[in-house]
Every structure is written in structure tokens, then in C-alpha cells.
Image (spheres, grey):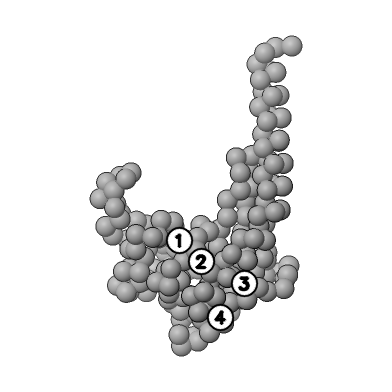
Amino acid sequence: MDWQIISIILLAISGIAGLVIALRQRSKAGPKKREEFCQHLKEMKIQASPMERNEQKEKIGRGAGQRSEGLVLVENANIDFINIISVSTQYGTNYFLDYLVESPRLEGKEVAKKVKLVKKKSQALWGQVVNITWKGTNPLTQRLNSDYRLEDMLMSDSFKGSIEINPEPKWQYTRIRTTYFLPTPDLFGAMNLIAKYIRLEYGYSKGR
């Protein structure tokens, strides 16, 4: 048999084996991520609690290969609940947080496009973040860019990830997606402030 064919077969087997291992690890680690995140919010005096399984809410904006590891209810905040998302490949499992905000006025809005946080660094690779801006053809963009308090919160050295705001008209919710991390009070405050602007644009205000 040709060695090139053999190497392709071996690579395929290796990839499948890696994916199986990643899926097994996800089945054990996923629920712990929700417990860890929920407990962290409680330690910051945020009213958070695990939600019962809800197939419809867990599906909001979820792509192929993504799985919900559970929902966390947040009370007295502009965020309604948080969905812990896992994505497994043969290289391992990555986790994300979807902060969900009810957005009943999204329906029928053609301008409801994705908004993304863009960081400007002093040097291309290893430089410090010196500025941030929001990009996207969405009315939210102007609201977010005009809030200097939000900018200060997100300039924190402890925030290394990215943020994408994804309106989901089909579900009448908007997702604020970040990589999985345990936020500081300031960073959770930033997520809650973003959620407030989403409510002003597409939902109803809770006044917080």
C-alpha cells in the first residue's frame, strides 16, 4: 500500500481518537464549569443560581459542534441568564460564555447585525492594549463607543479575551459571547452595562 495513503489513514485515525478523548473530557468537565462559574458570581454577591435544563434556551445561537453545559440564572441584572458553551475538537475542548438578553424588539429589524470589540495594541503581538473600539453596522455600536466608563472597564489588564454581540431575531434574544473566564466585579459590570444598551435598543430597560 502506498505510504501516502497509509499516512492519511493514520492521521484520520489519530484525529478521531483525539476527538473521542476530547468528548469524554468534556462530559466530565462541562458540568463543573457551570458550578465553578455560578459559585464565582455568588462570591461577588451577584444573585446567580443554576437553571433547570431548557432545550429551547440552550439552543439560542448555538452552532454545529457546540453544546450547552448548563444555564445560570442572574437576578437583579440586565443579563437574563448565561449559557456555558463547549466546543470539542481532536485538539481538546474550548469553553465560551453566552450572556443572554431578552430582545423582543429584534423581530423584523434588518439592521440587527453582529458587533465586535476590537483592541488596538501598542505592538502587533505582545504590546499592551491602548485603545478599544466597537465595530459593526448596528445602532448598538454608537451607544457602546460613546460610553467611556465601559471603555475603562474593558481596558483592565485582567481581560484578555474578545467580545461579540450577536442578535438572534429568531429567538428574540441577543447573545454577548466571550471566551470562558471568571470575571472581576468590573468585568461583570461591563457585561451588565452592555446588556443595558441591548435592552435600550431591542428590549425593555430594567433600570440597572
Of 206 and 106, nearer the camera is 206
- Let me know if residue 156 appears in the view: yes
Residue placed under numbered mark 1 in the picture: 163
Q: Residue 72 — which label?
A: 3
Pick out the residue farthest to the top.
1
Looking at numbered disc 3 in the image, what kind of residue is underneath it?
A: Val
* The quadrant where residue 120 appears: bottom left
Category of crowding for the residue at label 3, using alpha-carbon neighbours closer than 10 angstroms: few (below 14), some (14–19), many (at least 20): many
Looking at the rendered image, the quarter that the C terminus falls into is bottom left
Residue placed under numbered mark 2 in the picture: 176
Pick out the residue farthest to the bottom.
207
Spatial CA span between label 1 and label 4: 23 Å
Residue 187 in percent (x, y) is at 42, 68
Looking at numbered disc 2 in the image, what kind of residue is underneath it?
A: Ile
Q: Taking 18 as reference, is 47 left or right?
A: left
Q: Earlier in the sequence, mark 3 or mark 2?
A: 3
Element under label 3? Answer: strand
Element under label 4? Answer: loop
Element under label 1? Answer: strand
Q: Earlier in the sequence, mark 2 or mark 4?
A: 4
Q: Earlier in the sequence, mark 2 or mark 1?
A: 1
Of 156 and 43, nearer the camera is 43
- Let me know if residue 190 appears in the view: no
Foreground tag (1 vs 4): 4
Element under label 2? Answer: strand
Q: Taking 195 as reference, is 16 left or right?
A: right
Foreground tag (2 vs 4): 4
Residue 125 in percent (x, y) is at 33, 44
